[in-house]
Image (cartoon, rainbow, N blue to C red):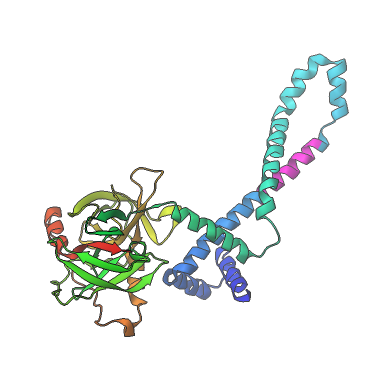
Amino acid sequence: MKSEIDLIKRIEAYLFQEMSEEELVAFENERKSNAELDHKVVAHLDFLKTIKGYGERRDLRLAMNEIHEEMDIEALKEEWVEKPSKLVVLWNKYKRNLAVAASVAIAFTLITLYSTGQFDTESHSSKYSELKRDMENIKRSQNALIRNYNNNNNTESQYGGTGFALSSNGYIITNYHVVKDADSVYVQNNKGDAYKVQTIYVDPTFDIAILQVQDSTFKTLPSLPYTFKKTDSDLGEDVYTIGFPKDDIVYGKGYLSSATGFGGDSTAYQISIPVNPGNSGGPLMDSKGNVIGIVSGKQTQADGAAFAVKSDFLLKAVNNIPQDSLGKKITINQKNNLGRLSRTQQIKKMQDFVFLVKVYN
């Protein structure tokens, strides 16, 4: 608990600009490298804004009370009884104050009801935990783009998603929610060849899963034609994805519509691309042939609002894999061969490195 409180104090010192220049730089670097810390900073900032709004409403209520005290109610009564003709004058004089006072009274009543469960004596850390649970509920309201289908030769439930090559020696990346709780997982290339794979690493925080082909018939892929972008992309940038919402590969085109994902998630982009169940785990590409993210879900209440985990967090997940758990080294490609090609040529090149992920429960 003490360490959590100390962390909150650091976050507030950062938000209130009470850090030295050296501490500020160190904290911002830590925030960039630690997604969990970044989430806590964003969540605590939202919490402080809520508290500030409550304080402003309370100050306004006190100001309205002072206005009420300055008003001579008895004089108003006399004006009403003895000089009714002055009622219009008095109304014009005080109607704004009275309207504001009534609005404040209503707002304060609502705030009081709301505050019974929120503005109590609990610590900052417990309030953050409650906010975190709320955010988890928000995330679960998204559509996970997993395709559900039945195999005529197998009565067990199966799920389908998309994955793409992380390296040429059999490592494939997809979403964690695609392979979660799977008994066995297979991948199938665009030629119809299927290979059994093993899930060697998962990162539920970033919704990332790393698979490795465990099949003697698998041949090493050619060198990957794409690279993984390490910096953020720009709003309005032209992007596309290819994946398996059906048994053959499907191309989808759109643009980057927000620098954050669902609920302000800083680890993801919002994209305007038509995606469907089965697109989960597909690569999000820019026009220069860089992987800038991995498609993860869409918002059910809004048309054209899909989300993709940023490639920077994809690479962080790869770097967190214990080296002793790898049978072969994962070498991230540093040479891009797609940048000068047309879109149709890029897609032709990409098809050999994108896989249909089949999950058996």
Picture residue at 20% right of the left edge, 52% below the top: 250
208 shown above or below 237: below
Q: In the picture provided, is 138 more to the left or to the right than 17?
A: left
Q: Is residue 339 visible?
A: no
Q: Residue at x 73, y 31 (%)?
A: 98
Residue 147 coordinates in the image, percent (x, y): 29, 54
In the visual, does 28 lie left or right of 317? right
Helix, strand or loop: magenta stretch: helix
Residue 261 in percent (x, y) is at: 40, 55
In this orientation, which residue lies closer to the viewer: 63 or 132? 132
Residue 24 appears in the figure: yes
Q: Is residue 146 magenta?
A: no
- The answer to whether 287 is drawn above or below residue 33 in the figure is above
In reply to whether residue 61 is colored magenta, the answer given is yes
Q: Position of residue 271 (x, y in %)?
A: 33, 51
Quadrant of the rendered image containing residue 320: bottom left
Q: Nearer the viewer, residue 304 or 161?
A: 161
The image quadrant that residue 5 belongs to is: bottom right
Residue at the extreme bottom of the image, as rendered: 324
Report the span colored magenta. Answer: 55-68
| Quadrant location, the N terminus | bottom right
In this rendering, position of residue 99 left or right of residue 167: right
